[in-house]
Image (tube, grey):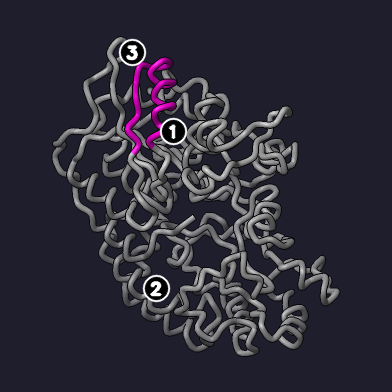
Amino acid sequence: MKKIGILSLVLLLLTGVLAACSGGGSEKSSGDSTDEEVKLTWYMIGTPQKDTKDVMKEVNKYTKEKINATIDMKMLDWGEYNDRMQVITTSGENYDIAFTSSWANNYALNARKGAFLGLNDLMDKYGKDMKKLIDPAFLEGAQIDGELYAVPANKEVGQQAVLSFNNELVKKHNLDISNVNSIADLEPLLKVIKEKEKNVTPIATFDAYLPFDSILQEELPFAFRLDGNTDEVVNKYEEDITMETLKTMHEYYKKGYIQKDAATSTDSWPLETPNWFVRKEIYQPYAEDVWSRSAGYEIVTRELHEPYIFNNSVTGSMQAISATSKNPERSMMFLNLLNSDEYLRNLLDKGIKGTHYEENEDGTIKDLPARVENYNMPSFAIGNQLILKLYEDDPKDKWEKFEEFNKNSTPSPALGFYFDSNPVRTEIAAISNVTSEFSPALLKGAVDPEEYLPAFNKKLKEAGMEKVLDEIQKQYDEWKKKQ
């Protein structure tokens, strides 16, 4: 998943009150009845696909029969989605449904400023089927002040950082990764790779893992600890564990385990190019199988922590109903169908059977060239993952493992707390600027934390750090009393 940048965050924080509603988009008002056919406008994130029109013809045949509605799906590419949706929202354009998340089309901010409808009553009335299927942790954790403003995609509810290894190199050099439980444990393995693999970078550039639940964005300093005093908001860049971890990263940088241009490089380290030994990833059950299939060689993992349920993980993929929608009831009916009806969910995700994929006798599927080339949709962004057909090489218990993973995920102490940044938005804008100056180099090990962290924290204080921490603590304490 792509992350919203700090600049985008600042722009969103400075967004004013919604403009008055105007323009066209949704057609007619449906009320509770489905007697009148309506067209729903749905904004989706992802690269526009050549065969979308053909698939949507089949989708609309089905939704017309089921809820007397057709869907006009407008796909906006990854790089433009945030900016386009911000313009659409502030202009008051009428539309019905839009993808939102913690990292795109900012869920919490848009909910608070009235861009999205509250869904509790609508879901109770028209979303009963999907409510039975979606893990309760999603529905509870995504509520803001007791109200749900978007339907979460049912998938992995926990977030777990892991270290992923190129297993070809592990086997080649007879390396033991069984005792790797932290970044610090990597040292002897990295030394071997550096000495014996001249064309391999030991560490594919990543930000250091820090054990906090971050508020607003991961790069920003405001956070809650995951152990110890978990009810105190802190500046994570002042914590001992941060200094210790960043010192380790800097040692690796000095020894050549990390690229010299790590702080500024935009290299995405594609899996298909085996020029790396270890990288950090976010895990879900059987993720190593997916990564290995994509890479063309085996990838194995070691976990850095148990799976935690964060606000960012329960709001990582959602569909909201616009406050400007003329058809909120029918929109909820469509979302209910999308997240509970296997035929519709697979049609939107995999395309047309016989054209984009073929089905085996046991119910598993395999992609045909037309899907790969003309209908490669962002599966995680559409809806309920756990009702998708399995590929023929998927483990038979894949979705059972997802349910087990979710059951074993631990809620963060701040799960369900959504900070209202409006009272300190000027300070947050200043802090964001300071963070963008210091954090990339620090988190990637490119500078000495003993020198740069004190300078960073000094500038954070000058930018209003204490005022923001006080405001977060005040809001958190008030929220905690209501739980």
- Foreground of the two, 90 or 395: 395
Mark 3 → mark 1, Cα distance in angstroms: 23 Å
Instruction: Give x and y (percent) for residue 323.
Output: 26, 34
SS label for mark 3: loop
Prevailing secondary structure of the magenta residues: helix
- Foreground of the two, 468 or 375: 375
Q: Residues within 10 Å of mark 3 (few under 14, many from 20)?
A: some
Q: Is residue 477 above or below residue 402?
A: below
SS label for mark 2: helix
Instruction: Give x and y (percent) for residue 238.
Output: 50, 74
The circle on residue 55 is 1
The circle on residue 138 is none
Mark 1 → mark 2, Cα distance in angstroms: 44 Å
Dot 1 amino acid type: Val
Instruction: Give x and y (percent) for residue 325.
Output: 26, 30
The circle on residue 34 is 3
Dot 3 amino acid type: Thr
The magenta segment: 53-73
Q: Is residue 263 visible?
A: yes
Q: Is residue 382 above or below residue 188?
A: above
SS label for mark 1: helix
Mark 3 → mark 2, Cα distance in angstroms: 51 Å
